Image (cartoon, rainbow, N blue to C red):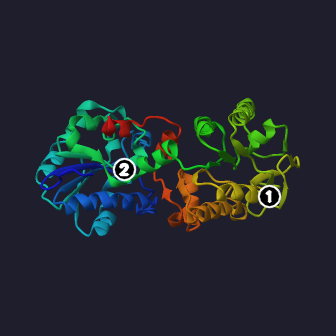
Amino acid sequence: MNLDFKGKKTLIRVDFNVPLDKTTFQVTDDTRIRAALPTIQHILDQGGSVILTSHLDRPLKKLKEDGSIDVARFTLRHLVAPLSEMLDREVLFCEETVGEKASAMAAQLQPGQVLLLENTRFQAAEEKGDEAFAKQMADLADIYINDAFGSAHRAHASTTTIAQFFGPDAKGFGFLMESEVKNAKRVLESPERPLTAIIGGAKVSDKILLLEKLLELVDNLIIGGGMAYTFIKAQGGEIGQSLVELDRLELATDLLAKAKARGVNLLLPKDSLIADAFKNDALREEANSHAIPADWMGLDIGSEAIEAFSRAIAQSKTLLWNGPMGVFELPNFANGTRSIAQAVAAATANGAFSLVGGGDSVAAVNQMGLADQVSYVSTGGGAMLEMLEGKVLPGVQAIEG
């Protein structure tokens, strides 16, 4: 971010799409706000002023009964107090995203001041990538910085279209965006080997493109979570009531064949922690993943699987983790995910590079207090997934060209 910010107004597209308490509208998780602070602070320290723009949720898809926007619920005004406290200065707020008031407040902004604009998604033009709307936003500032990696896969006005109105010396990535792109590229373009991907979650269908791409890249592919049972069923296993996508069995068979042909070591859980119901206090025991009784279901990986997966992780130099190994939100079925998190942290301590991306795996390392023991935790679930799938992100392309 080696631009000259002194005496200039910088519009930063941040990702302040944070969870709010439903009644008090207090921020319940400020991770995304804190992630943007280094970029904001750097520009202020250089003698610039900052205009912040972000979306919050999907207000146009959650209209009130009379068809109007629920401003009280979705306004970014809720973020003014916590942001002011974090930056140790008053944050000004404009109830417009663009318009006469936004233009006037931006024009009056002095070095060291911060202005937060209203939710970009109050305007239908935002999601349409509308040029006129993007131009109005661009006219508020001298420099444009995109620091919203979590929205980089959207070709919206404030994340993508706007960049065309700034020259190459007046636009760039913020520190967060820079590090997200750099760390993803480290795994995709120059990984130290062996490279192991640990993929979990419920459905194969959610991760088809990722799995296809990883088979071209990795040395080891570990598959856990509910999606593992579609592969085990495809191999002829008896999986009881475990989650399965019967319409994806052929795909699973195809992916298994591709892994074999490419010499990728694909690991499925040999055993599972099974339960007689989908609830925390269900009866539970360990069983061979290919021989789960008819009325039981696999809700976590078993001890043999933990051992085999941990061994592969320990021998790796680069690790990518996306998705939990079981129903980790139920404490009795969180051990597999916890063990994998610990194995990834231990491998990192031994010199491996580890990237954790995707909402549930990020939640898992945070919940287990291991976020600072892995190399990088991505803030952008969907964006990171698309980047790892090999897609070009519009928000990245708009800056890099």
Point 84% across, 60% down: residue: 285
Point 58% across, 40% down: residue: 217
Quarter holding residue 92: bottom left
Task: Please provide percent x and percent y for residue 221.
Answer: 66, 45
| Nearer-the-camera pick, 94 or 305 | 305
Describe residue 341's horizontal placement relative to residue 146 as left or right. Answer: right
| Nearer-the-camera pick, 135 or 271 | 271
Local secondary structure at mark 1: helix
Task: Please provide percent x and percent y for residue 363.
Answer: 55, 59
Work out whether mark 2 precedes mark 1 in sequence or the reverse, and give the earlier one: 2
- Residue under numbered circle 1: 304
Task: Please provide percent x and percent y for residue 391.
Answer: 48, 35
Quarter holding residue 228: top right
| Image quadrant where one finds the C terminus | top left
Q: What number is the disc on residue 175? A: none
- Residue under numbered circle 2: 178
Identity, as a three-letter code, of the amino acid under mark 1: Glu
Identity, as a three-letter code, of the amino acid under mark 2: Glu
Point 44% across, 58% down: residue: 20
User: Does the image show residue 57?
Assistant: no
Q: Is residue 339 above or below residue 382?
A: below
Describe residue 107's horizontal placement relative to residue 171 as left or right. Answer: left
Task: Please provide percent x and percent y for residue 289.
Answer: 82, 49
User: Does the image show residue 209?
Assistant: yes
